[in-house]
Image (cartoon, coloured by chain):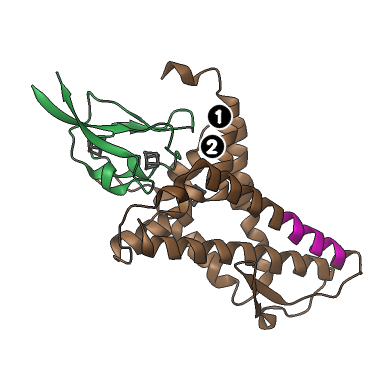
Chain colours: A green, B brown
Amino acid sequence: MIRKKAVVSINECVACGCCLKVCPRNAISIPAGIHSVIKHELCVGCGKCVKECPASVISLEVIEE
Amino acid sequence: MNRKKKWYDYLWLVSLTYLILGFFNILFAWLGLFCFFIPLLIAIINGNKAYCNKYCGRGQLFALIGGRFGLSSKKDIPKWLKSKTFRYGFLIFFLTMFCLMLWNTYLVFAGNNDLNMIVTLLWTFKLPWHWVYHGMLFSAGVAQFAFGFYSVMLTSTVLGLLTMILFKPRSWCVYCPMGTMTQLICQAKNRNTTQEN
Ligand code: SF4
Ligand code: SF4
Ligand code: SF4
């Protein structure tokens, strides 16, 4: 099955947390204050975080399962 | 935004009130020290950016004005603005200007300089701001710090609003010195644990 999931470019992430505020599935966390971490098993690929991220460092990528 | 609103989702009201109070009595500017020390303490003690992620009213304010009120073009921020060079450079510049402000405050405390009742916007434009000072019981240095600190807060708000309009609502968070500083602290503190992610 082919699905789209959100992927963060962790080196560019500023850990602001804008993404986790908009995720409807609570799939995002910033455990160590350095970059966000997205739980792929929760992500439904809605793209809200992609739109919100002020640094534009999240993208939807096709992940084959 | 299915999440239930919590008390800390309304902290933008505090940020807004803070900015407004500075137009009435400059001494309120001292309260801004909270949004200086709280994020640093959280980063140092807990090793995370909970301040940015949850509590920061300024970020919420930009999200509200830019997002809900639609005053943002929602374009991607240019590459150079999110580069580490610019972010760290801006942090250094910001801290340097901050130290200069502290030095000026010291000079007034020490009696070398007279109280200068201005708010300096963008480190350049000196705005007369004398109506907010009603004379007082403390040393003039106390007021000088308030003018200086309010200048910092107003400047960062203006810059934040500018990048909010040009790019995404919370673009300020990309180069916000507090955000960069807390991220650096977390990096130093959690150096050993991050590889696991
Ligand atoms: S919104 Fe973007 S920069 Fe901010 S924490 Fe999420 S991925 Fe990182
Ligand atoms: S794409 Fe949607 S579900 Fe997936 S992390 Fe982003 S906001 Fe959450
Ligand atoms: S980066 Fe700055 S403005 Fe943004 S949430 Fe953090 S402290 Fe607030």
Depth check: give the residue in front, B166 or B189.
Answer: B166
Give the left or right position of residue A9, taking residue B20 as reference.
Answer: left
Question: Is B185 above or below relative to B81?
Answer: above
Where disc 2 sits, the SS reads: helix
Question: Amino acid type of disc 2?
Answer: Gln
Asked if the stretch drawn in magenta spans residue B100, the answer is yes
Q: Chain of mark 2?
A: B
Where residue B16 sits: x, y (%)?
A: 48, 65
Residue receiving disc 1: B187
Give the left or right position of residue B182, taking residue B8 as reference.
Answer: right
Residue receiving disc 2: B183
Residue range of the region highlighted in magenta in the rendering:
B98-107
Where disc 1 sits, the SS reads: helix
Question: Amino acid type of disc 1?
Answer: Gln
Where residue B190 sits: x, y (%)?
A: 55, 24
Q: Chain of mark 1?
A: B
Q: Specify the principal SS of the magenta part.
A: helix
For the point 18% across and 35% down, the residue is: A45
The tally of labels here is 2
For the point 28% across and 34% down, the residue is: A26
Question: Is B183 above or below relative to B110?
Answer: above
Using the rendered view, name the quadrant where residue B24 is placed.
Answer: bottom right
Mark 1 residue CB less than 8 A from any atom of ligand 1: no
Where residue B30 sits: x, y (%)?
A: 68, 61
Which mark, residue B3?
none
Quadrant of the drawing holding the C terminus of chain B: top left
Neighbour tally class for label 1: few under 14, some 14-19, many 20 plus, Cα within 10 Å = many
